Image (cartoon, grey):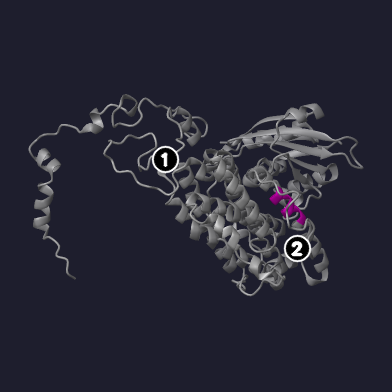
Amino acid sequence: MGITFPTPKENTERLRRLPQVRRWRDGDYTPGAWLTAPSTEQGGAWGSWGNSVTPGRRGITFMDVNKADKSGVPATGPGLTVDRSGGAAPEQPRYQYQMREKYECWSDNLESLLEEALSRQWYASTDIPWDKLEPLPPDQERALCQFVTFLHVVEFNPTDVIPYWMTRIDPAFSEARLFLATQCADESRHMEVFGKRLFANGGGPGVEPFAHAVMHPVPPHLMAVPQETLKLLQGKGPGYEFLQYNYQTQLLGESLVLDFFRFGEFLGRNPCDKEIFRRVLQDEARHVSYGTMHIKYYLEHAPKAERERALELLHYLAAASEAGGAGYDLLLNPNVIEPFVYLAAGSMDNIEQGWQYAREFWVKVVEEYLGRCERAGFPRWDTCLLPREAPF
Amino acid sequence: MTTKQTLRAAFPSAAWFAALQQRMNGETERFKRLGFADSRAIFIVKADAEMQRDRSFGVVFDTYECTEVRELSPADAAAFGHDWKLEGPYGAWKEMIENIRAHGAADADHTLGRLSLLKHPFRLYGDDQMRVDLFYRQQSSFQEYIDGAAAVETTFSP
C-alpha cells in the first residue's frame, strides 16, 4: 500500500498536541473570536447581528428572512461557504465558484418558488391513491405504459445534469442551489412514480422511445447544437452555459414535458392516474417558471455586451430547436405521439378523434411556448419556425 | 374537529363560491398536505342557451385558505389583478357540478385539467403565461376547492 497509518495511541498523542487541545487540557477555556469579535458592520469577523423574523402563517419563509436581512443578496458572491450575511476573517481563503454573479442564477420569483416547492413535496408511495387504480383493456394499458415509458426516460436528463450546475453556483445564492435541489428531488420522484406505475396495473416498461425513432425528415445539421452556437458559447463560462441549459431544458424541454403531463391528466381514466399526472405537472410547472424567469433576469441584469450575446444565443438556440433539432421532435416521435393519440382515441375505431386531440394539443403547446419566450424577454411570435398548426 | 354542516347555495352566485370557501377553510389540514396555493382567480360562467348573461367571480387563494370571494362586474374584473381566468359555458359548469355531487369528486371526464386542456368546454387564460402557470403549479389545491361542491346542495338558477 505504501501508506503507514499511525497506531491508535500515536493518533491520540497527535490530537493531544494540537494547540487548542493543549490549551483546554491546561484549563484555559477562554472562548475564541466567535464570541468576542465585532460584527462585519463594525469591522470585525462576525457576520450579521440583530436580525429577527416574526413567523407568519407560513412559518418563516425565505422571503421573510431576506426582508429582514439588512445586507440583502449581493450582486457578486464572496466565495465563502458561510451564509451570505456571515463573516470571515480577512485571511480566510476564498473559493472561486464558477458562477459568482447573481444574474447567472437568480430569478425574481426564486424565493417564493422555492417555498412553494418545499411545501408541495409529496410521496409517490402514499400520496397516490394506488388502490383506486383500475384495470384497463390490454391495448389501453399498453398505450399508457408506452407513454409512461417515454416520461420515465425524459426524467433522467435533468437529474443527470442539475448537480453539475449546483456545485458551480456561489453559496451566497443558496436559494438557487436549494431550488435546483428540489428539482432533483422532483425529477427523481417522477422517475419513481412512473416506474411504479409501469408495474402496477398488469403492464410493464415499453419501447425505448428515442433511438432510431425520429421519423420526420430533419436535416442532419439541425440534429445537434449548431457549430455557430457552440462558437458563441466558447470561453463564456458556466453562467452562459447555464443560460443555454435554462432555455433548452427548463423553458423548452420542461414546458413540453409539462404539456405531456397535462395531457396525461386529460387521458387518465381513474383517480390514481389522474393524481399521478396532477402531482407531476405541478412540479414541472415550477421548473418551467424558474427557467423562464431566470432567462428574464439574466437578460435584464447581465452586462450589456453579455446581454446582447445572450439574446443572440437564445434566438439561435430557439431557431435550431424549433426547426426540429432538439425538443419538438418529441411531438413527432412515433413512440411518443402514437400511444398518446391511441389513449385519447380510446380505440382504433376512434383514432381520427385521437389525432384531432393531438392537433389541438400542438396548437396549445406552441402558443404557450411563445408566451413563455415573450415573458423571458426574447419574443418569437414573428420569428418562430414551428408551425402554429400541427403538421399531421 | 370539523363540524359538518349542510351547505346550500344557488349557482351561479358569490354565495356558491363562498360555500366552497367555507368548506376549504374548514379543512385546513387537507389543504396543508397539498402545499401553499396563492392565486387570484376569476371563474367565469359564460352565457349560453340556458343563461342570459356572463357572470364572473373573483376568488383569492392565500397559503392554505380561500380569503376572498366576490362577484365581479366587468369593471371590477378589469381591476381585480387576476393571475388566471377559468371560463366555461353555464351548461358545462352545471354538468361538472352535478358530476362532482354524484361522485363525491370530479370523475375522470370532469376534472379542471381535463375540461380546460384543449380550450373546450372550459378555457384557461390570462395576460401573463407565468401567472397562468400558477394554475398548473397548484392544480391539486384548485381541484380540491372545486370538489368541495360535493358538499354543497346546489340549486341551479341561471
Q: Which mark is residue A77?
A: 1
Q: Residues within 10 Å of mark 1 (few under 14, many from 20)?
A: many
Q: x, y (%) of residue A109?
A: 56, 39
Q: Which amino acid, by three-letter code, is at mark 1?
A: Gly
Residue A12: within the magenta? Answer: no
- In terms of secondary structure, where does tag 1 sit? loop
Foreground: B46 or A359? A359
Q: Decide: is B30 above or below A184.
A: above
Q: Which amino acid, by three-letter code, is at mark 2?
A: Ala
Tell me: A48 left or right of A142: left
Q: How many marks?
A: 2
Q: Which mark is residue A344?
A: 2
The structure residue drawn at horizontal position 62% and vertical position 37%, both measured from the top left corner, is B38
Which quadrant of the figure contains the N terminus of chain A?
bottom left
Is residue A105 something that shows in the picture?
no
- Labels 2, 1: one chain: yes
The structure residue drawn at horizontal position 55% and vertical position 45%, both measured from the top left corner, is A306
